[in-house]
Amino acid sequence: MRIALVAEDYYPQLGGVPEHVHNLALQLNGWGHPTTVVTSRMREHHRDAEFVVRVGTSRVIYANGGVSRVTAGWRLRRRLEEVFRAGRFDIVHVHGGLAPTLGLAAPFAAWRAGIPVVATFHSWFPRSIGYRVFRRPLQRILDRHAATIAVSRPVVDATGRYFHADWDIIPNGVDTHFFHPDGHRRPAADALTEGPRLLFLGRIEPRNGLGTLLDAMPRILARYPRALLTVAGDGPWRGYYARRARELGASVRFVGQVFEDRPAHYAAADLYLCPTTIASFGVTLLEAMACGTPMIVSDNLGFRSVIDGGDEAVLLPANDPAAWADATVALLGDPDRRAAMRRAGVRKAARYAWPRIAREELAVYERVLAPSARARAQPTSDRRYVRAPMNTSVMASTNG
C-alpha cells in the first residue's frame, strides 16, 4: 500500500500534528508500506527525512492565542495532483481536515487523480465562524471523504456541532523507544535536598499558559527557594515572557527549542507543568508519562480525556496561579506520591505506543480500499457521527 500523509504543520515546527505525522510515516515505512509526507516549505532550515516532499510555501498566521500555518503557492492544487500521480498512491491521508490550505486543496487534487481521501481532525475549538458560514459547501466536501478520523472525543464533539460524519477515533501516539525512563533519573528525594526542578515544555504562546507558572513561582520559591523552572520551547512571545521572568532571577531559565534532547529534559524534572488553556489531546503529556515524569496539567477537555481519572497527573484550572503553586509545593514534599505517579504514567503511555496506534490507522486504510467498501462509499447527505468500536482497545482507559 502506497500512502501520502498531507500535513500543513510539520517539522521544523514542533507540535502534536508534526509528531503524529512523522511517527506514523516512520511506522508505516518500517512495515513496508511506502509512505510520503507531503507538506510545505518553511523559512526555518530543517534536514528532511527522505520520505518528505514539500510543495508551496508555508505562511504563519496568528489566531486563537497561538500560531497557525497556511500554504500559499501558484497552481497549488495542480502541483499536489502531480505529486499524487507521480507517487502512485493508494491513499491520501490529510491531517487537518477541512482546514486551509492543504486540508482543502489536497482532497480535490487526490480526487482528480482518482485516489480516495482519509482525513484526521486534530483540533478542538469552542466555536468556528468559518464553519458556521461555510457549513453547506464544507459538508459536501466532507461527504466525499472515504473515512474521517478524530484524535479524541472532544474533537468529534467540536466538529460535530457543524458537520455530520462517521467517525473513527484514533488517538495520538508516543515513541516509547525514544521517550522512556532512562535509568539515570534523579531520585525523588533530591527535590527536597538539592532544590526542585520544574519543567515547562511547549510552544511559547499565550494559550499554553506560561504566564500562570510565572505568577505561581513566587509562592513556590517562598517554600523552595532553590526551585528552578526550565522553559523549553520557542515562539514569538518568548521575549515577552522572558521580560516577565526577569524579576524571578535565576529561578527561571529559557533554553530555547528542544528536540532530540526532550527525553533528557523530562527525566531531569521532578514535575512537568502544563497549564495549556486549549487542547484537543496532549502529546507532551504522553511524552512525559513515557519518561516517567509526574505532571500537573490543566483541566481542559483534551487533557481530561487523556488523563481520564488516572493517577499519573493532577488536574487544575488553567488560570489559577495560587492553585498551581499550592499543588506544586504539595507534590514536591511528597516523593512517594510522585513515585506512584511516575509508575502510573509509564503504564499508561505503553498503551499509546506507535505500533499500536499505527495498526488502527492501517485498518482504516484497508477498510477504505476493500472493494466492498468502495462500492458503498457513495456520497450521502445524512451521515451521522458515531464512536467507532474498532478503537476500544485504546479507548478503554483514555480517549486521547
Image (spheres, rainbow, N blue to C red):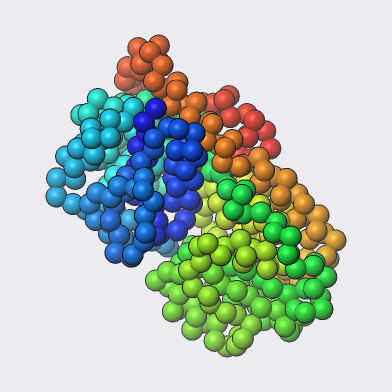
Q: Nearer the viewer, residue 190 or 164?
A: 190
Residue 123 seen in this snapshot: no
The structure residue drawn at horizontal position 57% and vertical position 25%, both measured from the top left corner, is 390
Occupied quadrant, residue 152: top right
Q: Is residue 201 above or below residue 95?
A: below
The structure residue drawn at horizontal position 44% and vertical position 42%, both measured from the top left corner, is 25
Q: Is residue 354 above or below residue 197?
A: above
Q: Is residue 276 left or right of residue 398?
A: left
Q: Is residue 8 above or below residue 363?
A: below
The structure residue drawn at horizontal position 73% and vertical position 45%, both measured from the top left corner, is 347
The N terminus is located in which quarter?
Answer: top left
The structure residue drawn at horizontal position 39% and vertical position 38%, both measured from the top left corner, is 35
**Residue 108 location in percent, x, y?**
24, 34
Occupied quadrant, residue 323: bottom right
**Residue 52 location in percent, x, y?**
34, 48
Residue 389 seen in this snapshot: yes
Occupied quadrant, residue 220: bottom right
Q: Is residue 239 left or right of residue 353?
A: left
Q: Is residue 327 left or right of residue 87?
A: right
**Residue 167 location in percent, x, y?**
47, 29
Q: Nearer the viewer, residue 93 or 185?
A: 185
Tag count: 0
The C terminus is located in which quarter?
Answer: top right
**Residue 82 location in percent, x, y?**
19, 37
